């Protein structure tokens, strides 16, 4: 297992160990879980790209529907655009490209339905959390940001830096204003 992937696993385990502290606020637990998953995806992507040799070949034109399903690639692209509001266009395209490649992979034929179902469920959860946070009054957002900081301060310095990097990159599934609030809260002097 590569060094980057090991760090991602450690990062995930550290967030998992803090679950009891988050039991009081499911929203904080969701945010830390999302940060953990983002770190894992980044670590896995970096690991794959480091192992890849040679020029990148363009992805084939996707079929009208994924084999064995009634789902069209355009439907998944629309789902990504509607649910991952916190991502930029290039990041949304990257999510689609990776999902599309996994669904077109012949060895994943038996898993296409479950992959699509899981991704759709997760995307809808992200959108619901995003909308819930966006609707919170400013005072509640401030309270959550303070709690987020307390939980983040309990992490090792290396993991705190990774969390701040995820916030700077806008990779947590929160509205941009709340992302900036979390980043500013982490940057405040103690």
Image (spheres, rainbow, N blue to C red):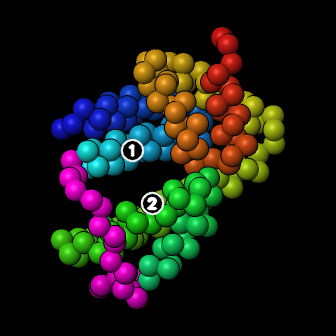
Please provide percent x and percent y for residue 57.
29, 67
Q: Earlier in the sequence, mark 1 or mark 2?
A: 1
Closer-to-camera residue (71/117): 71
Where residue 89 sits, quadrant-wise, is bottom right
154 w.r.t. 72: above or below = above
181 w.r.t. 107: above or below = above
Please provide percent x and percent y for residue 141.
74, 37
Q: Quadrant of the N terminus?
A: top left
Where residue 144 sits, quadrant-wise, is top right
Q: Residues within 10 Å of mark 2 (few under 14, many from 20)?
A: few
Residue 98 falls within the magenta-colored stretch: no
Please provide percent x and percent y for residue 42.
39, 44
Can residue 79 be seen here? The reply is yes
User: Position of 61 compared to 174: left or right?
Assistant: left
Can residue 125 be seen here? The reply is no
The residue lying furthest to the top in this view is 190
Residue on which the image places disc 1: 42
Q: Which residues are magenta?
A: 51-71
Residue on which the image places disc 2: 94
């Amino acid at each position: 297992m590569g060094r980057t992937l090991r760090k991602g696993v450690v990062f995930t385990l550290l967030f998992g160990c803090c679950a009891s502290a988050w039991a009081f606020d499911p929203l904080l637990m969701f945010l830390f879980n999302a940060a953990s998953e983002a770190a894992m995806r980044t670590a896995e992507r970096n690991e794959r790209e480091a192992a890849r040799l040679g020029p990148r070949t363009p992805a084939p034109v996707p079929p009208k529907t994924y084999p064995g399903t009634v789902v069209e690639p355009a439907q998944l692209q629309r789902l990504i655009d509607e649910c991952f509001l916190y991502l930029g266009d290039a990041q949304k395209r990257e999510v689609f490209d990776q999902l599309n490649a996994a669904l077109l992979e012949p060895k994943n034929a038996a898993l296409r339905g479950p992959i699509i179902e899981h991704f759709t469920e997760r995307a809808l959860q992200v959108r619901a959390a995003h909308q819930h946070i966006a609707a919170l009054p400013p005072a509640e957002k401030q309270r959550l940001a303070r709690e987020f900081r307390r939980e983040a301060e309990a992490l090792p310095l290396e993991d705190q830096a990774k969390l701040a990097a995820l916030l700077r990159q806008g990779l947590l599934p929160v509205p941009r204003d709340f992302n900036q609030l979390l980043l500013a809260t982490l940057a405040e002097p103690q």
